[in-house]
Image: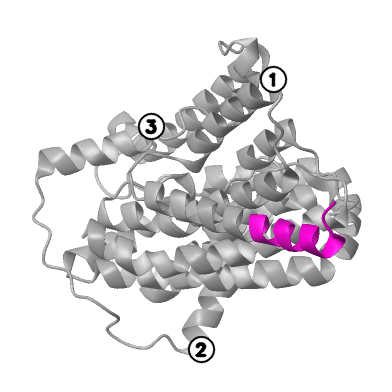
């Protein structure tokens, strides 16, 4: 019979290996435009269910770190296709405009590094904050905010719709032509909002997905297909991309980092904690709240926001006494294993920290390879 010390050392080795493997695999696959980490996790869940049916055990020491590592790796490295290939997911959508500007002046590699630096700092603050205050502060915050979540979400919806306020029709002859021109953008926004809500009702109450794959119903619909319009436009337009310069054109000062990280933590944390709010919406709210205008600050904030959103939503599943499930990764994880102790919580935090280090070290080589 092995001694307890040997068993503990073996568990630690499995945790380290699983977190590093998940981060490395997800980091490489994140460079493929349109391949979302939720697609990968969905396939993983199907495979693990098949194994458990056949009596093959799956330990928490391998499942938890590997899942956390995959989410961290994707959150860090999906910056590469967002900037260099203009194929972002919803949470990274707002990096496209500054990222494209950097790309077209030969500084796309710099934009990737700046955004990834924001993600790394956001991960550090997330792990530090959750490790020190999570089990005490978050259950209390949930008890305070949960009775008011309905009007908070309605305020978010109202802000999104009001941000589509008529932008045209300021000059010219009055009449229906001017009215229709003014409401063209707003009408498209309202129609998109209503159709998306209608699709949500269909998926929740009349889902076409078979019962054996019903857990997939909790994921965003059409995950990964968001890249197709961008890629088709890139192919048709045949834009000439200039040669990209390696490295940074200047140092990132403390004020730039602080402003970007503050905005990103606000947006990503809000999106991770409140149901129905995604990383893109959180980043939009944070950008307006902090009046982010500088391109570098904006890229840092978006890198922080999407990493805090994806990883934070998954880590909330492990917080003792919280009982909150946010995001597709947490829902799929819960179908395989339900965390039940603080050991799982700190294992997930350690895996996130290790995966962040591994994935950040891969940013430079994979960005240069994509270029």
- Type of secondary structure dominating the magenta stretch: helix
Q: What is the x, y in percent for residue 191?
A: 46, 28
Q: Residue drawn 40% across and 39% down?
A: 35
Q: Nearer the viewer, residue 199 or 135?
A: 135
Element carrying mark 2? helix
Q: Nearer the viewer, residue 75 or 227?
A: 75
Q: Residues within 10 Å of mark 1 (few under 14, many from 20)?
A: few
Q: Residue drawn 25% across and 65% down?
A: 368
Q: Which residue is mark 1?
A: 53
Q: Which quadrant holds the C terminus?
A: bottom left
Q: What is the x, y in percent for residue 246?
A: 23, 76
Q: Nearer the viewer, mark 3 or mark 1?
A: 1
Q: Nearer the viewer, residue 210 or 255?
A: 210
Check if residue 100 falls in the magenta segment. Answer: no
Q: Residue drawn 86% across and 60% down?
A: 4
Q: Which residue is mark 2?
A: 254
Numbered mark located on residue 225 in the image: 3
Q: CA distance from mark 3 to mark 1?
A: 32 Å
Q: Which residues are magenta?
A: 1-15
Are dots 2 and 3 in contact, CB under 8 Å? Answer: no
């Amino acid at each position: 019979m092995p001694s307890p010390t040997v068993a503990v050392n073996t568990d630690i080795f499995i945790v380290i290996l699983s977190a590093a493997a998940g981060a490395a695999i997800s980091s490489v696959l994140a460079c493929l435009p349109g391949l979302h980490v939720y697609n990968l996790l969905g396939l993983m869940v199907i495979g693990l269910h098949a194994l458990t049916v056949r009596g093959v055990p799956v330990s928490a020491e391998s499942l938890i770190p590997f899942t956390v590592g995959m989410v961290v790796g994707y959150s860090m490295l999906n910056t590469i296709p967002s900037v260099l290939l203009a194929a972002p997911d919803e949470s990274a959508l707002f990096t496209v405009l500054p990222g494209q500007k950097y790309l077209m002046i030969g500084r796309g590699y710099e934009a990737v590094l700046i955004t990834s630096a924001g993600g790394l700092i956001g991960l550090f603050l997330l792990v530090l904050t959750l490790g020190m205050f999570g089990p005490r502060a978050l259950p209390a915050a949930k008890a305070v905010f949960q009775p008011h979540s309905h009007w908070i979400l309605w305020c978010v919806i109202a802000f999104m719709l009001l941000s589509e306020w008529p932008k045209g029709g300021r000059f010219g002859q009055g009449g229906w032509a001017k009215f229709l021109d003014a409401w063209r953008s707003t009408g498209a926004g309202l129609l998109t909002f209503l159709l998306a809500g209608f699709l949500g009702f269909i998926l929740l109450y009349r889902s076409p997905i078979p019962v054996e794959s019903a857990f997939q119903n909790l994921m965003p619909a059409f995950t990964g297909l968001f890249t197709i319009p961008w890629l088709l436009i890139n192919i048709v337009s045949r834009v000439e991309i200039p040669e990209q310069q390696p490295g940074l054109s200047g140092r990132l000062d403390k004020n730039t980092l602080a402003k970007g990280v503050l905005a990103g933590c606000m947006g990503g944390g809000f999106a991770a904690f409140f149901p129905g709010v995604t990383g893109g919406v959180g980043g939009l709210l944070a950008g307006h709240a902090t009046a982010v205008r500088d391109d570098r600050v904006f890229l840092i904030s978006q890198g922080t926001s999407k990493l805090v959103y994806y990883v934070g939503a998954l880590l909330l599943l492990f917080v003792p006494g919280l009982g909150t499930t946010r995001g597709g990764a947490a829902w799929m994880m819960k179908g395989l294993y339900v965390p039940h102790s603080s050991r799982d919580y700190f294992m997930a935090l350690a895996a996130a920290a290790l995966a962040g280090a591994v994935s950040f070290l891969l940013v430079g080589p994979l960005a240069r390879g994509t270029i």
